[in-house]
Image (spheres, helix red, strand yellow):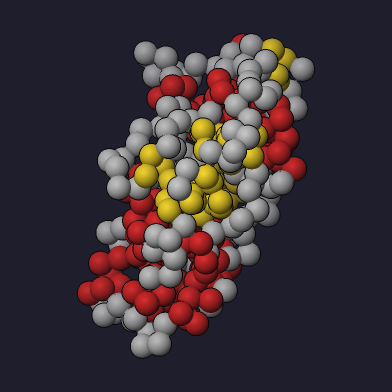
Amino acid sequence: MTHSSRKPISRRIDHYRWLRSDGTPNFNDHIYKAPSELQLVVKREVKVISPSATIMKAVEEMSRSFRSLVVTTGNRPLGILHASNIVDYLGGGSLFNIVEKRYGLNLYSALEREVVETIMTRRMVQVPDTAKIINVLEAMAVTGSGVVLVVNKEGGLEGIVTEHDMVVYLSGVVSTGLIVKDVMSTPVAVIDRKSSLKKAMEEMITQGFRRLPVVDGEVVVGMLTAVDVVRYFGSHEAFKKTITGNILEALSVPVEEIMSENLVTVREDEDLAKAVYEMLSRNVSSVLVTDEEGVLKGIVTERDVLYALSTASKRL
C-alpha cells in the first residue's frame, strides 16, 4: 500500500501489456472466434451534452452516475467530458488555473459561467458502425481508452461502447482460470480519511486514477471515485460547505465526508470469476482486495478484468 505523498505509481497492468512487440493486440484466439456483432455490446442511447452547456449543467447530469458525457453539435461528436475532466477543473489539476485566474476561486462563477467545451477531452476513439466487437477491443488496447464511440459514414454518433460493456460481454464467453492475485494491481495509491478533498483530487490527476481507496491507518474504510467528486458538486452539497463562495472552502472538507463506505471486497486467493461477479452485480468499476483484517492488498479494475478476459485461454 502506498500513501499519496509518494511519487506516481505505475499500474502493473497498463494498455502496453495488451500489445506485442509489433504493436498488435496480444489477444487469445478464442476472442477472434467469439460472436462478433457490434450490437451485442453497443449502447444506442448515449448521454450527450452541448459544447456551450455550463459546467454546472454537466455536473448535475453526471451526478446521476454518468461517468462521461459525449459532447455533440447536432449528432456529430466533438469530444468527451469525463468525470476526471471535472476533477481536474475543480481543483485536481492544471485546469484549476481557470478557476483561480478567470473566476477568482469563486465556486458559483466557475460552475455557472464556464462551458463544457473548455475542459472536455477532444481526443476521441471511434469505430464505424460496420465494425466488429474485436475492432472495438483492439481500439481500446491500442489507445488505452475505456470509451469507444460508434459513428456512421457521415460521422454521426450511433452509439458508445465502454470497458464495462466489454467486461459484461466477455465474461459470458470466456473463462480465465485465474485467481484474483494473478490479475490485481499492486501497489495501490490510497488517501487517508482525514485528508482534504483537494488533496485527493490532486492525487487522482497526478496518478491518473479515477478512484482512491480511503484508509484509516492500514485498514481500508471507503472508496473515493471521480464520480463521487462530481456528485458532491452536482448535488449542490459543495455549496453548503462554503460561506464566502470560495471554492477552497468546499475543497477543504475531509475525504471521509465524500467517500462511499459501501465497499466491495474480495480475497486474493479467490477465483477471478468471483471478483467479476461482484463487480457486475454491484455495478461498480473496481473491487478491493483485502485480507481478513481489512488491510488492502490490491485492486481489480474493469481494465484489469478486460485484459485478463482478452488474453484468456479458455472459452465457455
Q: Residue at x 38, y 39 (%)?
A: 2
x and y percentages locating residue 107 in the rendered image: 38, 79
Left or right, 63 with respect to 255, comes to: right
Q: Answer with left or right where residue 101 lies relative to residue 292.
A: left
Return the residue nearer the eye: 174 or 280: 280
Q: Which residue is at a point 30% across and 72% down the rendered structure image?
A: 99
| Image vertical order of residue 127 relative to residue 113, above or below | above
Tally of marks: 0
- Judge whether residue 169 can be spotted in this image: no
Q: Position of residue 215 (x, y in %)?
A: 48, 49
Location of residue 16 in the rendering, given as x and y in whole percent from the top left corner: 40, 25
- In-front residue for pair 157/40: 40
Q: In the image as oriented, which residue stretches furthest toward the left?
A: 101
Residue at the location (56% across, 23% down)? Answer: 181
Given residues 45 and 119, the one toward you in this image is 119
Q: Is residue 157 visible?
A: yes
Residue furthest toward the bottom?
244
**Residue 285 locus on image (x, y percent):** 60, 44
Q: Quadrant of the N terminus?
A: top left
Res 114 → quadrant: bottom left
Observer-nearest of 219 and 260 = 219
Residue 274, quarter of the rendered image: top right
Instruction: Please report the residue visible at 46 percent of the width from the left and 57 percent of the height from the top.
Output: 193
* 120 is higher (above) or lower (below) than 142: below
For the C terminus, the quadrant is: top right
